[in-house]
Every structure is written in C-alpha cells, then in structure tokens.
Image (tube, rainbow, N blue to C red):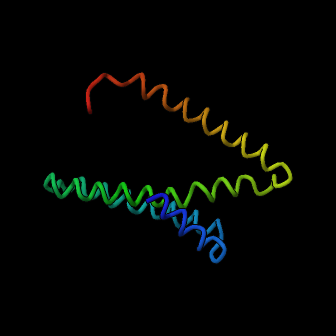
Amino acid sequence: AAGSATLLNALLVMRLGMRFLITAALAGQCLIAGAMIAVSLAAPPEPVFFALFVVWQASLFFQVGLTVGNINAMAMEPLGHIAGFASSIIGSVSTVLAVLLAIPVGLMFDGTPL
C-alpha cells in the first residue's frame, strides 16, 4: 500500500503540491480513524471487524506513503545547498525519537499477545 502511494505521489505532487497532499492525507487519516472508532463501538461480528480492520490498516499505510516522503522533502526545502547533511540530521532525529518512544512500550510488554 505504501509503495503504490509513493508511485501515486510522484504523479500528483507536481499537479497538486506537497502541502495539499500532506493536508489531504492527514485529513483522510483522521476521517478513517474516526470511522474505525465508530465501527468498533458498533461491535460488529469478529469476521466483519477483522475485514474492516485490514482495510483500515491498508488505507493508513497508503496515506503514510503519501505523507512521509512529502514531509521529508518539505523539511529539506530550505536546506537545498546542504541537502545531504540535512537528510542525515532528519534521519538521525527521527531514529532517536523512535527509540525514545519504543523504550517505554518495550518496558510495558508483559509477554502476552494483548
């Protein structure tokens, strides 16, 4: 899903612009998350809920594919003269933030599936 979003992004970014694609993808993520909350509150049968969950996850991965590349490109826009350095700093910061978020989650794991 993320790969197809990246290909679609390559076609749309020149026509619509990065900011519009980011805004539309984030709005889509919020709408689909709200719809999934409503579905889970309705308590559908397990097979139906699982199918909807898979569709929801695929749509989120698709929207992440539209969002992340554009956000990284937008972050490097003012730093075109040092794009390699800027890319390495952005990658380092995102890795450190991911580790800082993953450590507490890992510490809360108690060995059970849920």
| The quadrant where residue 89 appears | top right
Residue 18, percent from left and from top: 65, 66
Question: What residue do we see at 65% from left, 71% from top?
Answer: 17
Image spot of residue 53 (x, y percent): 28, 54
Q: Is residue 30 above or below residue 94?
A: below
Q: Identify the residue at the far right of this view.
A: 81
The vertical placement of 51 against 84, above or below, is below
Residue that appears at 55% across and 29% down: 100
The spot of residue 81 in percent (x, y) is: 86, 53
Quadrant (top left, top right, bottom left, bottom right) of the C terminus:
top left
Q: Quadrant of residue 97?
A: top right
Identity of the residue furthest to the left in this view:
45
74 left or right of 4 in image: right
| Closer-to-camera residue (35/96) | 96
Give me the residue at 38% from left, 24% from top: 108
Q: Quadrant of the N terminus?
A: bottom left
Residue at (48, 64) in percent of width and height: 4
Left or right position of 39 against 18: left
